[in-house]
Image: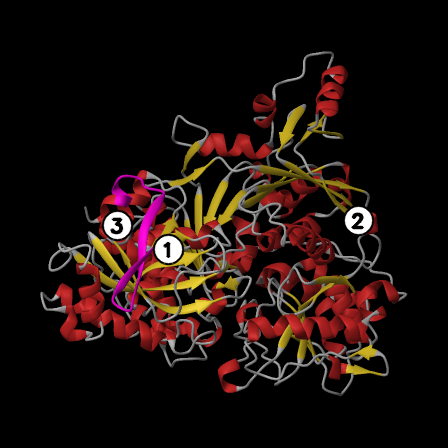
């Protein structure tokens, strides 16, 4: 089904794979009559290289400084981004910037604050020359596909699923500060990423959809990090067998592999997509060069993919549905065991009690958002459910078209009626089911969803209140088949149903009637509307000469998601309020964290007020006394005090900057990790002035509650140190150990020295 090559590979004429081995290199030279390019030259033949080169503003392709063509954000990120940019002198958006309203669009939590954010967004679009998409019109990524993507272009979004590679656009999801840099005419600075080829052959069998292919890929590459922080480039003859919607459905899920971005070869199918949307001039043919070198190669025979399921609580926890049904009790027991690591034993989590007469029963189905709400997915679900009923029992089915134009066409062609007649509820464009703010199932229920993630809490449960529900990811087709079987898990391939599909006709009238588009013209006279929940960022101090850190949380899960660092769901309403949101930091993982961090922060606030930190935090006295046994000069004017957390591998999942900024607001100065799950989380730490320390192994030289001392930390950052001397301060003594830090650009070092990106831009 899926094969990962152990080495890099050459792709010749788009159809022949030659693995990078001594024998393979000889084969390449023979096939090209000794005119084979070097590996370095062939690496320039990827589609990714060409797009990155066209957007690189430096003269060094190993050290990229990227300027994007367009930006996009939604309503739980754009307030903080614009507030940060305003604090740094923003006068006008220098490029098209789309503000969509698809996350807090229900305006159901927190009184007026969600709609206040929307009015902030609308007035900022007018003042600074943006585009404003009102609630319920489109989810962020569908609008980008319909109206923004262009062949060969680059888009940066403040949502991790910013992926438009199937349309020939290299798109990346990052934390808000990276968008701030673009708004301030700065650059996105990265080393040239590796490029992994994804070579497709064959064609999917009936009943298999894009989520099945995506989950198969994620299951094959997530745990081994095969594509981590690299670009996935989809090539091969199998691409031609896939519709545009099918490609888009695979592409959006590449985020769950932890890759940096994605890009696909384009063809007449993608040309037609642009034509249907009235943007034929935005199509560009993209293909690798005659010889292209890839740092790895994933070979996929699409005809061998079968309906898949990702069990709780990660998209990589994958099985074929047939495999699961054949080994139900064993696989579910294993899932329960794994889940307790993430759930910390806080609740009684059971999946085996959902097995009735040898079949797994689920209580809810959802087809929604940027992954599931596409036209073809919903038409396929309608074909499967036509003339059938989901039944009058516990099982429910909700469907969210990804945009109003899609919804309008489903109404016109009768698919919406077929879905509703079966008992499904058809709703407006909304991302809520994907992050815990919509269709929350009952306690101990299992929901199957064609959405992007199934982390703990993504469905809305609260472990600290004893509430638990869980999500399994599936394709729309098998969700519909399960619905037709009244909630008993069923792969779509088991039903004798012809999925006919329907032709899509895009009607942009609703967009023309409702979307505000400044056409790039700013109106400085517009007054921004501020609701009472919209607050400025608090002042943040520069990095001190010497640093005392108290460890206030210690997390030993294999991976810690951003949902665990700052929960999603109802907390999203407070993302425009840095201090208010910070109260939720780690609340579902380590509820004592906020109190511990605030206690330590008292010392730093005393230092900033010119007072003695010992008076604010008495336990600090013996710590400073111990430090003075070796570093007598440490004291007033050269010392900072803050908190830190340890996590094995933090930052998987969402791009949300608040996973880092909330720690900073509470006095965090650093993270310590064995590794960082994603580039974007590490970037968020840096942009909020936090030190992204690394330490080898889980046999730590400190424990939760310990104080650490890092002498001369400012000088070390300034001098580009990669190793930092640190001490555990305990029992009146200093116990030395080492911390390391990965590569930083000159700008990143300066941001840390200044204390955060806002301070950096006030220089």
Q: Which numbered mark, 3 or 2, is in the foreground of this view?
A: 3
646 or 274, nearer to the observer: 646
Residue tagged 1:
685
- x%, y% of residue 45? 60, 26
Residue 731 magenta: yes
Disc 3 to disc 1, C-alpha distance: 16 Å
Look at the numbered disc 1 and give the secondary structure of its residue. Answer: helix
> Does the segment drawn in magenta span residue 34?
no
Q: Is residue 744 above or below residue 54?
A: below
Magenta part of the chain: 716-736
Instruction: State left or right for residue 83 relative to residue 219.
Output: left
Query: Of marks 3 and 1, which one's residue comes earlier in the chain?
Result: 1
For marks 3 and 2, the one nearer the N-term is 2
Where residue 638 sits: x, y (%)? Answer: 15, 55
User: Does the CB distance between marks 3 and 2 fall below 8 Å?
Assistant: no
Q: Residue at x 28, y 69 (%)?
A: 731
Q: SS for tag 3?
A: helix
Q: From the image, tell me which residue sits under label 3.
A: 713
* Residue 292 x, y percent position in the rendering: 64, 27
Residues under numbered marks 2 and 1 in contact, where contact means CB atoms less than 8 Å apart: no
- The answer to which quarter of the image holds residue 617 is bottom left
Residue 682: x, y in percent? 42, 52
Sooner in the amino-acid sequence: mark 2 or mark 1: 2
Q: In whole angstroms, how far apart are the C-alphas of marks 3 and 2? A: 50 Å
Tell me, yes or no, if residue 157 can be seen here: no
Looking at the rendered structure, which numbered label has been put on residue 1? 2
């Amino acid at each position: 089904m899926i094969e990962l090559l152990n080495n890099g590979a050459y792709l010749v004429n788009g159809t022949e794979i030659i693995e990078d081995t001594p024998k393979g290199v000889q084969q390449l030279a023979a096939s090209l009559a000794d005119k084979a390019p070097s590996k370095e030259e062939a690496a320039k033949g990827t589609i990714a290289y060409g797009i990155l080169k066209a957007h690189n503003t430096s003269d060094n392709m190993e050290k990229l400084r990227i300027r994007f063509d367009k930006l996009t954000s939604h309503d739980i990120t754009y307030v903080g981004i614009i507030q940060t940019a305003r604090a740094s002198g923003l006068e006008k958006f220098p490029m098209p910037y789309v503000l969509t309203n698809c996350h807090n669009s229900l305006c159901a939590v927190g009184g007026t604050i969600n709609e206040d954010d929307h009015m902030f967004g609308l007035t900022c679009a007018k003042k600074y020359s943006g585009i404003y998409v009102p609630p319920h019109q489109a989810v962020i990524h569908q609008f980008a596909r319909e109206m923004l993507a262009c062949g060969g272009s680059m888009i940066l979004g403040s949502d991790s699923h910013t992926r438009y590679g199937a349309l020939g656009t290299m798109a990346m999801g990052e934390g808000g500060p990276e968008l701030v840099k673009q708004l301030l005419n700065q650059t996105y600075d990265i080393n040239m990423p590796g490029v992994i080829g994804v070579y497709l052959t064959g064609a999917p069998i009936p009943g298999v959809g894009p989520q099945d292919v995506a989950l198969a890929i994620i299951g094959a590459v997530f745990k081994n990090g095969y594509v981590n922080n690299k670009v996935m480039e989809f090539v091969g003859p199998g691409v031609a067998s896939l519709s545009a919607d099918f490609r888009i459905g695979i592409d959006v899920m590449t985020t769950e592999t932890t890759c940096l971005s994605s890009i696909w070869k384009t063809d007449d199918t993608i040309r037609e997509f642009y034509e249907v949307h009235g943007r034929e001039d935005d199509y560009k043919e993209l293909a690798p060069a005659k010889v292209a070198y890839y740092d790895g190669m994933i070979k996929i025979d699409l005809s061998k993919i079968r309906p898949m399921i990702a069990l709780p609580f990660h998209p990589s926890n994958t099985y074929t549905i047939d495999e699961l049904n054949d080994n139900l009790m064993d696989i579910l027991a294993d899932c329960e065991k794994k889940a307790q690591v993430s759930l910390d034993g806080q609740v009684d989590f059971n999946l085996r009690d959902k097995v009735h007469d040898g079949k797994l029963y689920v209580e809810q189905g959802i087809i929604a958002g940027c992954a599931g709400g596409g036209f073809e997915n919903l038409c396929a679900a309608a074909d499967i459910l036509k003339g059938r009923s989901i039944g009058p029992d516990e099982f429910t089915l909700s469907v969210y078209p990804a945009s109003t134009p899609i919804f309008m066409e489903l109404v016109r062609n009768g698919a919406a009626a077929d879905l509703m007649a079966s008992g499904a509820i058809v709703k407006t464009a909304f991302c809520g089911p994907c992050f815990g703010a919509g269709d929350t199932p009952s306690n101990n229920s299992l929901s199957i969803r064609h959405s992007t993630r199934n982390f703990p809490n993504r469905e809305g449960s609260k472990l600290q209140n004893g509430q638990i529900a869980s999500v399994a990811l599936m394709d729309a087709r098998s969700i519909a088949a399960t619905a037709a079987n009244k909630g008993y898990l069923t792969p779509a391939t088991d039903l004798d149903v012809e999925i006919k599909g329907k032709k899509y006709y895009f009607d942009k009238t609703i967009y023309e009637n409702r979307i505000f588009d400044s056409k790039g013209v700013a109106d400085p006279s517009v007054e921004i509307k501020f609701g009472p929940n919209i607050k400025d960022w608090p002042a943040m101090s520069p990095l001190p000469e010497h640093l005392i850190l108290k460890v206030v949380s210690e997390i030993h899960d294999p991976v810690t998601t951003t949902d665990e660092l700052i929960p999603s769901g109802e907390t999203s309403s407070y993302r425009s309020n840095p201090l208010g949101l910070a109260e939720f930091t780690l609340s579902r993982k380590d509820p004592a964290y906020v109190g511990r961090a605030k206690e330590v922060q008292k010392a730093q606030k005393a230092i900033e007020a010119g007072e003695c930190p010992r008076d604010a935090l008495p336990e600090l006295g013996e710590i400073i006394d111990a430090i003075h046994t070796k570093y007598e000069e440490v004291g007033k004017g050269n010392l900072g005090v803050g908190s830190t957390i340890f996590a094995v591998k933090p930052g998987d999942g969402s791009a949300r900057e608040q996973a880092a900024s909330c720690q900073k607001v509470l006095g965090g100065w650093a993270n310590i990790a064995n590794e960082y799950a994603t580039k974007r989380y590490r970037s968020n730490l840096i942009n909020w002035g936090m030190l992204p320390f690394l330490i080898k192994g889980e046999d730590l030289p400190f424990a939760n509650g310990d104080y650490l001392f890092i002498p001369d930390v400012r000088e070390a950052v300034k001098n580009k140190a990669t190793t930092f001397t640190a001490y555990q301060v305990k029992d009146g003594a200093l116990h030395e150990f080492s911390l390391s830090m990965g590569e930083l650009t000159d700008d990143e070092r300066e941001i840390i020295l200044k204390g955060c990106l806002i301070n950096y831009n006030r220089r």
